[in-house]
Image: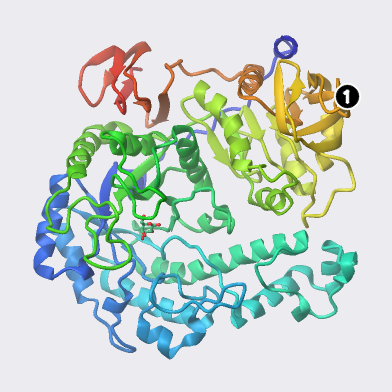
């Protein structure tokens, strides 16, 4: 095929790739071993029961427990009244059972006395609805009073257990979700705009408010709600909401940092939807020690590619290993069908997390409260306090983690390839989708799948972060390219890197305004080509070697070479370039203008890997996922059979079988089977 011929020819021209980034420092406490545990709510149970719970945790191999994150009313039963003694006793008792503790701050659930006395702390939705007591998340992240109250309780928790040797870290709040549209938030918004723009003229210009008479003559005229509006306004609102969350978090973070031991970590668990984009998760994670998320499947079964990519996204928030602060113990209570995972699937999920850089796995939850909204959720022990069927599988995980921990500790996934994920672009495209089915995560996964199939690890990173360690960088959805970002990407390419841009790249500037150059805007010159017109497709069109659907851009090339052409398409596109590429010194920039089918994408990515000089990892049969971690002079391989058929996996060389002992060259993996191997030096 012509694509391959061009790629092969380009390969002959030779490339020198940048060196890979490696770290060999001593891991912090959160990465020094594999951590296993669950969320435990001692405040919901008589104290006489605690010993039995902790003994059962120890018996399944737990070495960590998370407590405290919803227990505000227990810690502060009334204004001015505090009870921290139970927390201290729970921490110490956990310690006696050989368990380290992560303390969650309870700011997701303010007590009823508080919301009654201070109704100004309640969260208000964009349509004005006030959220009252009875659920959770009924607080305003912007309320100065709420921040003060949060600071107070967190300070007291820190004073109580911040120096306890059993406490290894802190989780701030729980699953940041809803911003508030109360008066304090509104005032912050207008102040934020003023700080950003200085003058209303600058704001009016950035948002092109001459359109539809939107011109503002006073700051407080600028709307503050959740409606669909001017895309420049909507983008700034997202950035403001991000900054509000960062400030809300920072308020607690300062108190914790100032009062706890130097070895204790601070994180937060960002919800089960890793790809959610209510705010910028890179910014949230910047001041934290590492990222955590909650890995739930919900209905159905694990989607290995998507789930694995989500772990990679989370790892990319900090560019370091992460924790799964909550994982599903078989089933949840909130899905359309809250079905049980297959036998072995819970174990496979745990190992997949580890394979993608997870160092801590905690089940949610240990035991269901006897009442409350989540009595139907899966747990490790039942209402009778005895192990449920899933406990046995988790016990196996515990034994395996103990066996594998020494080999895995201090290692991390290391990849020569990164996929760029960018919240500004996510928002910009979602605000103006142009094709209702355009799903940026699916577009990203289209690139991810063939890359992951070729490699034991793929990074997913932010656009503005360091890229020079990667041989190949793929940006599937980089709609918003500022001049600064264009410079960063240009430096990468000029430094010998290979950059692949997907459709819709470089349409918008820093204010979500159309660039006055054609796509990819400030990168068009480097590319030596541009987008003549984009088309949302209502039918599949032919592309040399395959098809495109949903989106196709008509490209032109002045300096670039044509990599792919449309065949018979929509008339406008017929025979025109669909993908173009240009060598720039030792580097290269490629623009793919269409959403192409899987087979063509596999060919394209194969060519890009070859072109960039990336060495593939060994091939595995269908359904089997290969994951690699390295560091401390060790190279670990994790293999999981996510399918329903047994699979034979020949290894390229003899490896040490960490879980079963011995040296192996070929493995047989049953459905949900897991192998953890160490490559011999
Ligand atoms: C999480 C949340 C937990 C629990 C769990 C149920 O999103 O953090 O508190 O509600 O879902 O699946």
Which image quadrant shows ligand 1?
bottom left
- Distance from mark 1 CB to nearest ligand 1 atom below 8 Å: no
The one nearer the camera, 419 or 431, is 431
Residue topped by disc 1: 559
Mark 1 packing: few (<14 Cα in 10 Å), some, or many (20+)?
Answer: some
The one nearer the camera, 341 or 631, is 341
Element at badge 1? loop
Image quarter (top left, top right, bottom left or bottom right) of the N terminus: top right
Q: Does 44 appear above or below 78?
A: above
The image position of residue 390, as x and y in percent, is 21, 43
Residue pictured at 48% horizontal, 45% vertical: 314
The image position of residue 613, as x and y in percent, is 62, 18
Residue 96 horizontal side relative to residue 174, left or right:
left
Residue 498 horizontal side relative to residue 209, left or right:
left
Q: Does 325 appear above or below 563?
A: below
Q: How many marks?
A: 1
How did the renderer colour the structure?
Answer: rainbow
Res 159 quadrant in image: bottom left
Residue 162 horizontal side relative to residue 316, left or right:
left
């Amino acid at each position: 095929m012509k694509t391959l011929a061009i790629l092969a020819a380009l390969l002959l021209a030779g490339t020198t790739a940048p060196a890979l980034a490696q770290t060999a420092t001593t891991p912090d406490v959160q990465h020094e071993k594999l951590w296993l545990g669950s969320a435990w709510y001692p405040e919901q149970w008589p104290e006489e029961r605690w010993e039995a719970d902790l003994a059962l945790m120890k018996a399944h191999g737990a070495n960590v427990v998370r407590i405290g994150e919803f227990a505000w009313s227990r810690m502060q039963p009334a204004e001015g009244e505090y009870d921290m003694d139970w927390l201290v006793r729970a921490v110490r008792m956990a310690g006696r059972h050989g368990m380290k503790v992560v303390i969650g701050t309870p700011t997701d659930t303010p007590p009823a006395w508080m919301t009654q006395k201070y109704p100004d702390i309640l969260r208000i939705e964009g349509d004005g609805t006030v959220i009252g007591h009875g659920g959770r998340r009924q607080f305003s992240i912007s309320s100065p009073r709420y921040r003060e109250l949060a600071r107070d309780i967190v300070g007291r928790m820190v004073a109580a257990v911040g120096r306890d040797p059993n406490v290894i870290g802190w989780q701030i709040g729980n699953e940041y979700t809803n911003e508030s549209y109360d008066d304090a938030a509104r005032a912050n918004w207008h102040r934020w705009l003023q700080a950003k723009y200085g003058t209303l003229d600058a704001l009016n210009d950035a948002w092109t408010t001459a359109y539809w008479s939107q011109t503002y003559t006073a700051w407080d005229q600028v709307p503050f709600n959740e409606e669909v509006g001017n895309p420049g306004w909507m983008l700034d609102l997202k950035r403001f909401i991000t900054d509000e969350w960062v400030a809300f978090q920072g308020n607690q973070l300062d108190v914790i940092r100032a009062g706890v031991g130097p070895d204790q970590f601070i994180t937060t668990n960002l919800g089960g939807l890793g790809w959610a984009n209510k705010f910028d998760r890179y910014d949230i994670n910047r001041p934290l020690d590492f990222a955590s998320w909650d890995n739930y499947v919900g209905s159905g079964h694990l989607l290995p590619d998507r789930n694995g990519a989500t772990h990679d996204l989370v790892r990319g928030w900090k560019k370091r290993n992460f924790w799964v602060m909550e994982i599903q113990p078989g089933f949840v209570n909130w899905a359309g069908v809250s079905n049980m995972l297959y036998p072995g699937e819970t174990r496979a999920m745990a190992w997949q997390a580890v394979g993608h850089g997870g160092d801590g796995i905690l089940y949610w939850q240990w035991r269901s409260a006897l009442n409350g909204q989540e009595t139907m959720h899966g747990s490790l022990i039942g209402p009778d306090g005895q192990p449920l069927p899933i406990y046995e599988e988790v016990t196996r995980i515990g034994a395996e983690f103990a066996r594998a921990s020494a080999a895995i500790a201090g290692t991390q996934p290391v990849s020569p390839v990164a996929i760029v994920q960018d919240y500004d672009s996510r928002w910009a495209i979602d605000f103006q989708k142009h094709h209702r089915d355009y799903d940026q995560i699916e577009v990203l996964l289209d690139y991810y799948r063939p890359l992951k199939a070729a490699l034991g690890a793929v990074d997913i990173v932010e656009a503005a972060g360091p890229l020079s360690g990667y041989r190949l960088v793929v940006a599937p959805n980089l709609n918003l390219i500022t001049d600064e970002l264009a410079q960063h990407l240009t430096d990468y390419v000029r430094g010998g890197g290979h950059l692949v841009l997907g459709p819709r790249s470089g349409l918008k500037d820093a204010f979500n305004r159309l660039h006055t150059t054609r796509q990819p805007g400030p990168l068009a010159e480097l590319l030596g080509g541009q987008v003549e017109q984009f088309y949302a497709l209502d039918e599949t069109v032919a592309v040399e070697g395959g098809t495109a659907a949903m989106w196709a851009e008509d490209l032109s090339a002045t300096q670039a070479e044509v990599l792919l052409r449309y065949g018979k398409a929509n008339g406008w596109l017929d025979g025109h370039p669909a993908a173009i590429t240009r060598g720039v010194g030792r580097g290269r920039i490629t623009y793919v203008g269409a959403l192409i089918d899987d087979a063509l994408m596999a060919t394209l990515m194969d060519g890009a890997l070859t072109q960039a000089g990336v060495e593939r990892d060994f091939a595995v049969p269908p359904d089997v996922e290969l994951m690699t971690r390295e560091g401390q002079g060790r190279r670990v391989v994790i293999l999981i059979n996510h399918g329903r058929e047994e699979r034979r996996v020949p290894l390229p060389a003899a490896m040490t079988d960490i879980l079963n002992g011995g040296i192996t060259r070929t493995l047989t993996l049953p459905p949900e089977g897991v192998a953890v191997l160490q490559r011999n030096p």
